[in-house]
Amino acid sequence: MTLAVIEPATERVMAEVPRAGIEETDAAVAAAKAAFPAWRAVAPGDRSALLRHLAEALEAEAEDLARLEARNAGKPISDARGEIAMVVECFRYYAAAPERLLGQTIPVTGGVDMTFHEPLGVVGLITPWNFPLVIASWKVAPALAAGNTVVLKPAELTPLTSIELERIGLDAGLPEGVLNVVAGPGSVCGKRLVEHPDVAKIAFTGSTEVGRTIAAGAAQTIKRVTLELGGKSANVVFADADLAAAAAAAPSAVFGNAGQDCCARSRILVERAGMDEFMAEFERQVKSIRVGDPLAEETEMGPLISAAQRTAVASYAPDGAPVAFRGEAPEGPGFWLAPTVLAPVSNSDRAAAEEIFGPIACVIEFEGEEEAARLANATIYGLSGSIWTRDGAKALRMARAVETGVISINSNSSVRVSTPFGGFKQSGVGRELGPGALEHYTDVKNVYYAT
Ligand code: NDP
C-alpha cells in the first residue's frame, strides 16, 4: 500500500511513499526496543556529539528540506526556511543536554541519597501537518538526548520531511533502530503506538479531540503523556497601546501559516477607544497580505492543507456573516482561502468560541482591564496570547490574569527553543522546549546508599 502525498498549492500528487499499518508500527517499536539498551549506554559526551552531527547534517540539507516542507504543507518558503533553521537549533540546543542531565544529592540519615533521571525506553511521537518537521524536532531532540529511542508518526498529509529526518539521522551516525518513522494513518499507527505495551510514553501535538482519546488510551498502560492541543488565543489591544504597531503585527499573528497554527491569535480583543484607529490600519495590512505560490520569495500566506480543511474553515464565515473586510486569494487549483476578518463579533459566537484553524479572525470589543481578562479567559483553551499597552504595570497584571501557557507583551511571539511552550486548560498537558523538556522524557529514580 502506498500513500499519495498531495501538494496543497496545486492539488497534484507530489510523492508516493509506503503506507505503514499495524505490522510496520509493531516492527518500528520492536526495532526501537532492541536499540534502547545500547543507546542509553552511549556515554553522555558521545550522545551529545551524535546529536551535534545530526544538527550539522540537517543544516547541510536545510534548503532542500525547506522546499520540501513548503511544497508539502503549502507554507511560504520564507516561513519554511525559518522552521528548518529552528529544527537545526533545536538539535543543537538538546545536544548539550546529555551532559547536563543532573540529579540531586539529598541529605539523609545513615547514608547517601541521590537521584537519577532515567530514560523511559521507547517513546511514541505523534505530530500534526501544520508544522511537520519543526514540531517533530521539539520531541525527537529531547527524547534522544535523554537516552530514549523513538518511533515518530507524522501526519499522513505531511510525512516527507520526517522520512528525510530518519535518513539524515542514520547518515549522521545514529545507530539503527534509535529513530524510526512510520508514515500511516493516525487511527491505525497512532492508535497502535498509544496501545502498545512496549511504548513508555506518547508525546502528541494535534487536536484537542484526538488528544482526549490519546489520554484515555494511554491510561490503560499508565503511559506518560504530553499533549500540545488546540487554542483560541486572545490578542488584547488596549487603547493606550502603540496601535499602529499592534495593527501591523496582528495579521501575521492570526494569518501566519494560513491560520493553521495552534498559537493563532484568532480573537482580537480591542478596547473601545482604540477600535477605529486599530481597524483602519489592520484593514490596510490584511488587504496587502500576499497570498500565493509557497515557493515564491514574496509570498506571505499559502493555501490551506486540504479541501476538507478549507470547507471546515469556510463554514465559519457563511453568507451573512459579519465580514468587516477580506484580503485576496488566487483562483484556480489549490486550497486557497482569503484572509477574512469578522467584526463585530460576540465572544460567545461560534467563530469566537471554536478553534477555526484557518485564516478567519474575530474582532471583539471590550472596555477596561477586567472585561479584557474575563473575555480572554472565557474559552476552554489556554495556549498563547498577547497584550498590547504602553502601561507596564497593566501589562504585567494582564499577563498574570490570562489563563494561558505562553503570553507576550507588545509582541506576538510564542515559541523559542530555549523557553517552555505548552498549554493551560484543554490546550494540553506538560511543556515542550526550554531547559525543562527532558523532565518529560525521563523518570526520577531515587537511590539510597547506606553508609
Ligand atoms: P489531529 O489531531 O487529527 O492529528 C494530529 C496527529 O494525530 C496526526 O499525526 C494524526 O494522524 C494523529 N491521529 C489522528 N487520530 C489519531 C488517533 N486516534 N490516535 C493516535 N493518533 C491519531 O489534528 P490535525 O492533523 O487535524 O491538526 C489540526 C489540529 O491540531 C488543530 O485542531 C490544532 O488545534 C491542533 N494543533 C495543535 C498544536 C499545538 O501545539 N497545540 C499544533 C498543531 C496543531 P493522521 O493525520 O495521519 O491521521
Image (spheres, rainbow, N blue to C red):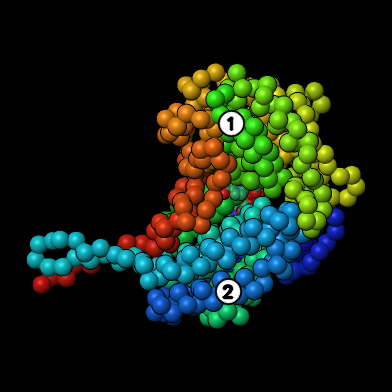
Q: Residue shown at 51%/20% (left/top)?
A: 368
The vertical placement of 269 against 47, above or below, is: above
Instruction: Give 446 or 190, whichever is nearer the viewer.
Output: 446
C-alpha distance separating marks 1 and 2: 41 Å
Q: Residue shown at 71%/30% (left/top)?
A: 281
SS of the residue at dot 2?
helix
Give whichever of discs 1 and 2 has the lower sequence position: 2
Query: Whole-percent x and y of residue 419?
Result: 46, 52
The vertical placement of 283 against 415, above or below, is: above
Instruction: Give 442 or 195, whichever is nearer the viewer.
Output: 442
Mark identifier at residue 242: 1
Quadrant location of the C terminus in the rendered image: bottom left
10 Å neighbourhood of mark 1: few (<14), some, or many (≥20)? some
When asked about the image quadrant of residue 363, the answer is top right
Query: Whole-percent x and y of residue 260?
Result: 67, 45
Q: What residue is pinned by disc 2? A: 56
Quadrant location of the N terminus in the rendered image: bottom right
The vertical placement of 11 against 410, above or below, is: below
Query: Whole-percent x and y of residue 80?
Result: 69, 58
SS of the residue at dot 1?
loop
- What amino acid type is highlighted by mark number 2? Glu
The vertical placement of 337 against 433, above or below, is: above
- What amino acid type is highlighted by mark number 1? Asp
When asked about the image quadrant of residue 256, the answer is top right
Instruction: Give 15 or 84, whichever is nearer the viewer.
Output: 84
Camera sees residue 317: no
Mark identifier at residue 365: none
* Cβ atoms at labels 1 and 2 below 8 Å apart: no
Q: Residue shown at 68%/54% (left/top)?
A: 79
Q: Residue furthest right?
A: 332
